[in-house]
């Protein structure tokens, strides 16, 4: 009886080590995946602030350690207009960061085609509907600042209201 107990104990040890190694390997893989997603997310954000005469523009995103779909950007539209984007893909995951990368690409290309923020968001939504997982939810504000007319026109798609302070 003691022989069988000792045999089982010695036999289980290699299995426990193998399981521990598998857990560590999976943990390292996940950490590497998050590192890549953090890199992608940080490169989606503006690397510098736009310089527009008469405007002080500043934005910052302080993501948590986790990766997610928080995003804002400035999109130059010709000489006198600037697109402004604030968006969030629900969830803290690598897929949220990658959906945000897809959204950024669409915003940059669509901003040259649509003057109306409302129309741009409608087209973006229809394209996301065709390509995204049905469980993915993204909210966004997109606006266009016209420097010549001093107007900011924007539309919201499920995002929190915009607070405008005028002096």
Image: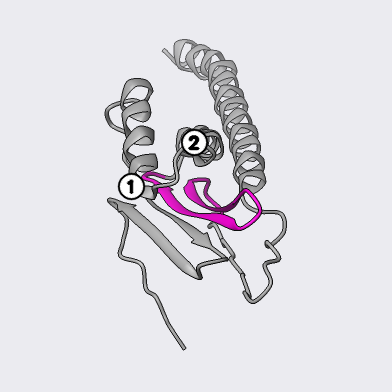
- Residue 112 sits inside the magenta stretch: no
Picture quadrant where residue 15 is located: top right
Q: In this view, does 85 lie to the left or right of 60?
A: left
- Residue 85 sits inside the magenta stretch: yes
Q: How crowded is mark 1: few (under 14 residues within 10 Å), some or many (20 or more)?
A: some
> Where is residue 29 shown, x and y percent of the image?
61, 28
| Residue named by callout 1 | 118
Q: What stretch is highlighted in magenta?
A: 65-91
Can you say which quadrant of the picture contains the N terminus?
A: top left
Tell me if residue 57 comes above or below residue 11 in the rendering. Answer: below
Q: Distance between the residues labelled 1 and 2?
A: 13 Å
Q: For mark 2, give the secondary structure.
A: loop
Q: For mark 1, give the secondary structure.
A: helix
Q: Is residue 79 left or right of residue 5?
A: right
Q: In this view, does 81 lie to the left or right of 155?
A: right
Q: Is the magenta stretch mostly helix, strand or loop?
A: strand
> Where is residue 127 shown, x and y percent of the image?
37, 26
At x 39%, y 49%, the residue is 117
Q: Residues within 10 Å of mark 2 (few under 14, many from 20)?
A: few
| Residue named by callout 2 | 113
């Amino acid at each position: 009886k003691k022989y069988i107990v000792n045999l089982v104990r010695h036999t289980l040890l290699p299995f426990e080590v193998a399981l521990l190694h598998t857990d560590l390997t999976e943990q390292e893989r996940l950490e590497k995946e998050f590192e890549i997603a953090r890199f992608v997310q940080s490169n989606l954000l503006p690397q510098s602030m736009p310089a527009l005469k008469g405007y002080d523009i500043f934005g910052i995103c302080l993501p948590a350690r986790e990766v997610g779909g928080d995003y804002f950007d400035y999109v130059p539209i010709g000489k006198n207009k600037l697109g402004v984007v604030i968006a969030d893909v629900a969830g803290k995951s690598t897929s949220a960061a990658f959906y945000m990368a897809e959204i950024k690409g669409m915003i940059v290309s669509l901003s040259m085609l649509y003057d109306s923020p409302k129309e741009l968001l409608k087209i973006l939504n229809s394209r996301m509907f065709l390509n995204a997982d049905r469980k993915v939810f993204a909210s966004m504000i997109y606006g266009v600042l016209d420097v010549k007319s001093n107007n900011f026109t924007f539309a919201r798609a499920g995002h929190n209201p915009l607070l405008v302070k005028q002096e």
